[in-house]
Image (spheres, rainbow, N blue to C red):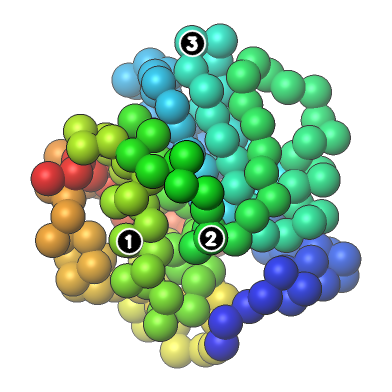
Amino acid sequence: MYYTQADWDELYHRGETPWEKGEPHPALLDFLAENGPLTGEIFVPGCGSGHDVRALSTKANHVVGVDIATRAIAKAQARRPIANEEYLLADLFELPAEFDHRFDWVFEHTCFCALDPATRRQYVDTIVRLLKPSGRLLAIFFINPDHDEEGPPYRVSPVELEEFFGPYFVVEREWVPAHTHRGREGRELMRVLRRH
């Protein structure tokens, strides 16, 4: 089922937002502590209320968070900026041409698994379109291959990740996060992917 902007807004209105944890993902914080801040232009799809965007934001980079939910973007914009981050209310699949090949990094967390599986190829095509030729995708994939219920989140498996991302990206690093949100232990896969 393809969720519309109205669907996502309604979930925020009802407070049915289990992906909103009130803080950045612990594994993202671990990565930044180990490797230092990401530099350049950074894109965060499905940014929600912007916790990960703020964790990524420094005076030396520029982070753009995008979400289709009006209430999510309103929450993100209501918070005091950390540095140069900005938030855009937009459909991920209808981004302006000025975003083409603009970004050094994309940070993925809970967007890929939230989208209707029928749109996954379109998602990957969009990420490839946004990244510079040497750009990287830092991703925390919610791996739940035994999840048979209707989503979101929808089932994702490592085999599917290879099917969709393999033609365009090289896996530079892959690991299971040591720290995560409660209930996700052992159900996530973190990767650094570089465009071919």
Q: Is residue 65 left or right of residue 163?
A: right
In the image, which disc is placed on residue 149? none
Image quarter in which the N terminus is found: bottom right
User: What element does badge 3 sit on?
Assistant: loop
Give how far across and how far down residue 52 sits, in percent. 57, 37
Q: Residues within 10 Å of mark 3 (few under 14, many from 20)?
A: few
Q: How crowded is mark 2: few (under 14 residues within 10 Å), some or many (20 or more)?
A: few
Q: How many labels does the image show?
A: 3
Q: Residues within 10 Å of mark 1 (few under 14, many from 20)?
A: some
Relative to the observer, which residue lies in front, 142 or 139? 139
Q: How much space separates mark 2 and mark 3, taking CA atoms?
A: 28 Å
Q: Which of marks 2 and 3 is in front?
A: 2
Q: Name the residue under label 3.
A: 60
Q: Which amino acid does label 3 sit on?
A: Ala
Q: Mark 2 points at which residue?
A: 94
Q: Is residue 94 left or right of residue 27?
A: right
Q: What residue type is labelled 2?
A: Glu
Residue at the image position 20 percent from the left and 33 percent from the top:
134
Between discs 2 and 3, the one toward the N terminus: 3
Give how far across and how far down residue 5 sits, in percent. 71, 69
Q: Is residue 174 above or below residue 19?
A: above
Between discs 1 and 2, the one toward the N terminus: 2
Residue at the image position 45 percent from the left and 41 percent from the top:
99
User: What element does badge 1 sit on?
Assistant: helix
Q: Which amino acid does label 1 sit on?
A: Val
Q: Where is residue 117, by image quadrant? A: bottom left
Q: Nearer the viewer, mark 1 or mark 2?
A: 2
Q: How much space separates mark 1 and mark 3, taking CA atoms?
A: 27 Å
Residue at the image position 17 percent from the left and 50 percent from the top:
169
Give how far across and how far down residue 96 sits, in percent. 52, 49
User: What element does badge 2 sit on?
Assistant: helix
